[in-house]
Image (tube, rainbow, N blue to C red):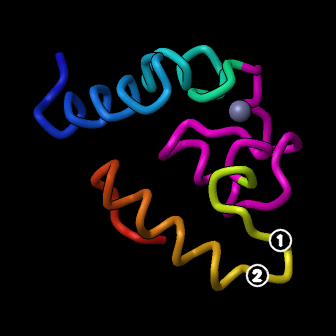
């Protein structure tokens, strides 16, 4: 049973990526490319791993969407804030 916020996130992910965010995360897959990416070691840092738990995006897709390098953590946090507004999460 999903509340309205969860329902909204599901619909947003489905519209953006064509698959269920909750099913992707439950199955340890990326919501965008479907590749299995659920281990901490699949991610560059703790922030990216946490991001997976929120948006369901693997490291490669996070980089592709946010287009940031390791030296640009501030810019990444800014970009993540926008995504989190889409998904209804607080900023990190
Ligand atoms: Zn991906």
Rendered position, 20 above or below 67: above
Are the residues at dot 1 and dot 2 in contact (C-beta closer than 8 Å)? Answer: yes
What residue sits right under mark 1 in the picture?
Answer: 69
Q: Residue 78: give x, y in percent of width and height.
A: 52, 77
Q: Residue 64: give x, y in percent of width and height.
A: 72, 50
Instruction: Inspect the magenta stretch and tell me whether residue 54 lies in it.
Output: yes
Instruction: Inspect the magenta stretch and tell me whether residue 71 lies in it.
Output: no
Q: Quadrant of residue 45?
A: bottom right
Residue range in magenta is 35-62
What residue sits right under mark 2 in the picture?
Answer: 72
Mark 2 crowdedness (10 Å alpha carbons): few <14, some 14-19, many ≥20: few
Rendered position, 87 above or below 73: above
- Tell which of 85 and 53 is nearer to you: 85
Where disc 2 sits, the SS reads loop
Q: Quadrant of residue 16?
A: top left
**In which quadrant of the rendered image does the N terminus lie?**
top left
Q: Residue at x 61, y 44 (%)?
A: 52
Q: Residue at x 43, y 57 (%)?
A: 83
Mark 1 crowdedness (10 Å alpha carbons): few <14, some 14-19, many ≥20: few
Q: Residue at x 77, y 46 (%)?
A: 59
């Amino acid at each position: 049973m999903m509340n309205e916020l969860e329902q909204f996130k599901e619909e947003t992910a489905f519209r953006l990526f064509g698959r269920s965010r909750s099913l992707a995360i439950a199955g340890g897959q990326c919501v965008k490319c479907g590749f299995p990416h659920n281990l901490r070691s699949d991610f560059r840092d703790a922030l990216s791993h946490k991001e997976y738990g929120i948006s369901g995006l693997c490291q490669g897709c996070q980089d592709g969407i946010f287009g940031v390098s390791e030296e640009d953590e501030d810019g990444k946090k800014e970009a993540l804030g926008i995504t989190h507004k889409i998904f209804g999460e607080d900023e990190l």
